[in-house]
Image (cartoon, rainbow, N blue to C red):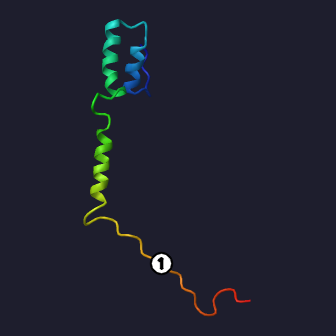
């Protein structure tokens, strides 16, 4: 089992899981350990998106809400423009 310095723990677990020279028990433990990093648990898939949407809604209202952009109107003065 050669160690690799730039290998993440997940990469190590996946490598051990897919190595046919390792024991079935070790490969099984590596599969269980790596699964939590690769697969989302049932019922937790959209939780973060909902929290993020709620945070945006709160940030867009109240005291710290961004103010609307000012209305800017360009006025023409006499003598300006192309009067040929």
Residue 41 lies, in percent from the top left, at: 29, 28
Q: Is residue 26 above or below residue 34?
A: above
Residue 20 lies, in percent from the top left, at: 43, 7
Pick whichever, 77 or 29, lies toward us: 77
- Which quadrant of the view contains residue 36? top left
Tell whether 69 sits left or right of 28: right
Query: How many C-alpha atoms fall within 10 Å of the one at disc 1: few (<14), some, or many (≥20)?
Result: few
Q: Residue at x 39, y 21 (%)?
A: 12
Pick whichever, 11 or 39, lies toward us: 39
Residue 1 lies, in percent from the top left, at: 41, 13
Q: Is residue 72 above or below residue 42?
A: below
Residue sitting farthest toward the left:
62
Residue sitting farthest toward the bottom:
78
Q: Residue at x 39, y 14 (%)?
A: 17
Pick whichever, 64 or 68, lies toward us: 68
* Residue bearing mark 1: 72
């Amino acid at each position: 089992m050669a160690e690799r310095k730039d290998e993440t723990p997940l990469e190590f677990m996946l490598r051990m899981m897919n190595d046919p020279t390792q024991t079935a028990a070790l490969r099984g433990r590596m599969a269980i350990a790596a699964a939590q990093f690769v697969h989302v648990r049932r019922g937790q898939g959209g939780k973060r998106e909902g929290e993020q949407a709620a945070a945006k809604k709160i940030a867009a209202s109240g005291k710290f809400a961004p103010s609307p952009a000012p209305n800017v109107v360009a006025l023409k003065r006499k003598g300006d423009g192309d009067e040929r």
